[in-house]
Each structure stands twice: as C-alpha cells, then as structure tokens.
Image (spheres, rainbow, N blue to C red):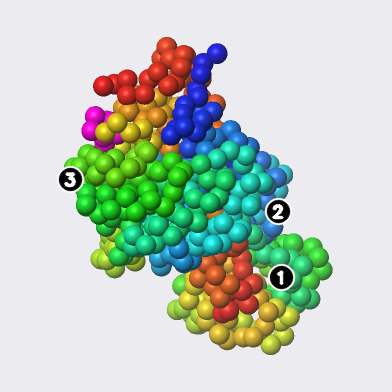
Amino acid sequence: MVDTRVDLCGVALSNPVIAASGTFGFGQDFAPLYDLNQLGSFSFKGTTWLPREGNPSPRIAECPAGLLNAIGLQNPGVHKVISEELPRIRQVFDKPVMANVSGFSIEDYVRVSELLDAQAQVGWLEINISCPNVHGGGMAFGTDARMAGEVTRAVRAATRKPLIIKLSPNVTDITEIARACEAEGADALSLINTLLGLRLNLKTRKPLLPFGTGGLSGPAVLPIALRMVWQVYEAVRLPLVGMGGVSSARDVIEMMLAGATAVQVGSANLIDPWACPRIIHQLPGAMAQHGISCLRDIIGGAH
Amino acid sequence: MRQTAFTILENTPIARDTYRLRLAGDTAAFKQPGQFVNLSLPGYYLRRPFSACDWQKGELLLIYKVLGQGTADLVALRPGTRLDALCGLGRGFDLNACGRQPLLVGGGVGVPPLYRLARELVARGRTVRVALGFNTAADAFLVGELQALGAQVRVATLDGSLGERGTVLAVCDADSASDFCACGPTAMLKALCAATRLPGQVSLEERMGCGFGACMGCTVMTPAGPLRVCREGPVFDREVLAW
C-alpha cells in the first residue's frame, strides 16, 4: 500500500490533488459526476466583496495545448458565497474547502478574508493577487513585491486560518515576490496563475477576446510552472501548492519533486470533468512504478 | 451529462461547407431537442460544441458547418474514427411550453436542432410550421427532411436563389402561430423577438470552454443575472433574456 497523504499548513489531505479555482465553480457542477470527497480539496471560484458579472463574450480562446481565458472574476460576491454556496458545498463535501479571495484594494482583500475566516468549512484562504483579467486590481498586487507584501500583511492580520498567497508568473523574478509574502506572514504560496497571452481575430484584426489579453493555462504552461515551483522552493521555506497544466498522476509527481506539497488541477477539469478522480486513481500505480511508497517523501526531491 | 466514445459512421457534405456527421454510440443522455454534444477533436485542447440534430438508440446525427480550423479538420475524419464526447449537455426546448401551432425559426447553422424538435412536436399532434433562412440556395439543407416530417416549411435566402428573398423574418407567419422556437445567429434571434410579442424560446450560441458549467466562459447577461449558455441554456425563454 502506498501512502498518498500530505499535510498542507497543518490540515491533512488524503491526497495532494486540489481542484483549482476558476475551473470548479463552487463544486456543484461536479458533485453529480463523482464523490467530491475523493479530492484532497478544492479551491472555490475567486470571490470578491461585491458580485461581479465578469467580462464581455467571448471569454475563451483556444491555443495549442491550452486555452486563453478572460472570465473576469464572475462570482456572486462574498455574502452570497457564505449564505448560499457554502451551505450547498457542505451537502456534497465533508472536508475543509479552500477559499479563493480576489480584490481590487487591500481593504477588499481584508473584508472578504475576515468574513471567510469565520466560516468553519474554510480550511485555507488562498489570496489571488494574480488575476490577469480585471482592471485596477488582481495581478497589480502580485507583480510588485512591496504591494504583495502589503496585501499579505493586511490579510494576515485578518485571519487565523492558513494563509496561502497565489502568485503571478507574469513577473521578472517570482522569488522576489515569494520572499516578500513569506516575510509578511504567509503560511504557503500557490503558483502559478495564468500567463498573460493574446490571440487575434484575423477577420477583424483585433484581439479575439474583447477584454484584449487573456490568461494562458493548460499543458502548454506545465514546464513554466515546474520551473517557477523549482525556483520558489529554493527561495523560501514555505510549503508550496503547485499548479499549471497538471493533467496526470505523472505530472503530480513531477510537480512534487520540483517542490510542491500539494498540487492543483485546473484546465484539465474543463476538458475532462472526471480529471481529478482519474488522476487520484492513477496516483498509487504511478507511485509504485517510480518506487515511491510515501508521497510526502518526494516533496522537493529534485533539489 | 455522460461521456461517450462515438465512432464516425458517415461524414458527408450536404450543402456548401455543411456536413452531415452520423455517429455510433450511446445516446441515452439526450433528453430534449436543443441539447448539445461537446466533441473532442484530434489535435485540439478544447472540445467543440454541436447541437444534436437527431438521435435514436445507438446513433447520433449532427450537422455542422466549417467555421474555423477545428471544423475544417473535422471534415477530413473518415468513418471508423473514434471521437470522445460529453453528451446530453444543456437545457433544450421545453415541449410542454409549446402551444398548438408552434413556429420554428432557424437561421443557417442554427437549423439542425429544429429537426428533432419538429419531429417530437409532430409526434405530439402539433401543427408545426418552419421558417428557414439561408444565405443562398447552395447553403440550404434539411428543407426536404422537415417537409417529410409533415411540417409546413417556408424558406428565405438573402439573394432570393431559393424561396423568398430576404431574411428568415420574410417567411415567419407569426400571426397564426401560438408561439415560436428559434435557433440561429444572435442578430436573427433579436430581430425575431423585436418583430413579435409571441411567447418564445430561443437557443443561443456562445464560445464555450467546458460546456458543462464549470468555467463561466459562455455567460450571457440577463435581468436575472449572469446565466451560463451551456448550463441554464442554450435554450432560454425570451422573457428570461428580456428580448
């Protein structure tokens, strides 16, 4: 028997696979397909202070080995998330859920985090300072070490839950941002959010997405995600949640060897709704094939 | 929703850039006309959504138009090729909401789901009239098949090469209809809604990511808030859209 358990900031996970925010809604579209309790956990849709309708359509463009999205943080707002979504999550998911928090000001991040901090179901706060698809916030906080540190410090004061900062890959040196978050009290870092990309419509000669740019995800970004997890692992002492193009148990193992304690699966959910349970089911076999008896033992094993 | 492996039985042209794709596989997930299938095509990351034109036990019929590289490559796939699909997606036309004399309105590549809808309505004893709009005679399809079901079919083409000259609105006899069901370009659907106050259901098209509600890629804004074309739709009551 192989051991797939990991510990993320003092919260036990039966396996390291976490469905990534923005690809899993609030779990309700997947709950009829499989028992969500098979997951290590899931990170729910990026939640803001006020409800958001998101960006104009189209919001999706295809790329080789992935997709561009510019959804724009469509969500019902933190109050409805707490009054409607969390009770529905409780009916289908017994484990701690990861709360993904987005904002347009430090005050936004703090007041959303304060409300979610009071929810027993929430196991971790994942602070998204890296959304590339909104103006006046999001990624602006994640591409400047001083601002990333300020958000971290402010949210740290607002929660006793494990605090995960989700980093943007759209920076010159991700380790600088990672160190700033560590210095201001982050408990863990998750990486990477999507990479800024662009596709053009040849008929209109304009961006295919009305928003202009979009975030690139999918297997195309896996090597970049692995490289950044590798770099950040060397730079900080915090546990890392690795993500970016993970589509198989083999990718999970590779991400953990690079330095991830847990691994998020994102885009794969969109093309295969059963991607997460498939990967979880594959894990013991892949571990045995590579001589791994305990998954915890391989974290950062490539270093 | 169900994941099914289909095998291509037939992939043949029936009009300009328009193909009939007959697939063998489990169709049990389809419950309503207007539901769609999200097909995985070799070499492409995202699936492609197609409305079901018709189905029976073990066989699914799609009609698609070549609009981009994905559908252009689909043309080359031969019988025997296996395609992975998510089936029975979305909320289709509500037959119980249809009146005694429904008018079915289709524009171009929006026509296929109306075939199954007409078939089920005729089977329920409704007097079904169909208005179809195409660019030219060379683009027209399903006209004879819909007539063979017993529907009264009128056709309009923009250049007048088949039926009336003009848009599909030229052949919509809304006065004698109890209600309408429509599928086609957004501009056509909006023009139709502007031209009549009849109760109606419209099937929307939007670029999709997942096709089952997870990615929020195909959201349409409504007075009731943002709704997902793939999940709350693709068929909406016109009142919901306030069109």
Amino acid under disc 1:
Ala
Crowd rating for badge 1 (residues with CA inside 10 Å; few <14, some 14–19, many 20+) = many
Q: Nearer the viewer, residue A153 or B64?
A: A153
For disc 2, the chain is: B
Most frequent secondary structure within the magenta stretch: helix
Q: What residue is pinned by disc 2?
A: B31
**Residue visible at 37% across and 39% down in the picture:** A187
At label 2, which amino acid type do we have? Lys
* Residue that numbered label 1 is attached to: B151
Closer to us: A153 or B136: A153
Q: Please say whether residue A229 is one of the residues in the magenta stretch.
A: yes
Q: Is residue B9 above or below residue B133?
A: above
The disc label shown at residue A172, or none: 3
Please tell me which residue is depicted at 51% across the width and 31% down the height of the picture.
Answer: A13
Q: Position of residue A112 (x, y in %)?
A: 45, 58
Q: Which residues are magenta?
A: A227-235
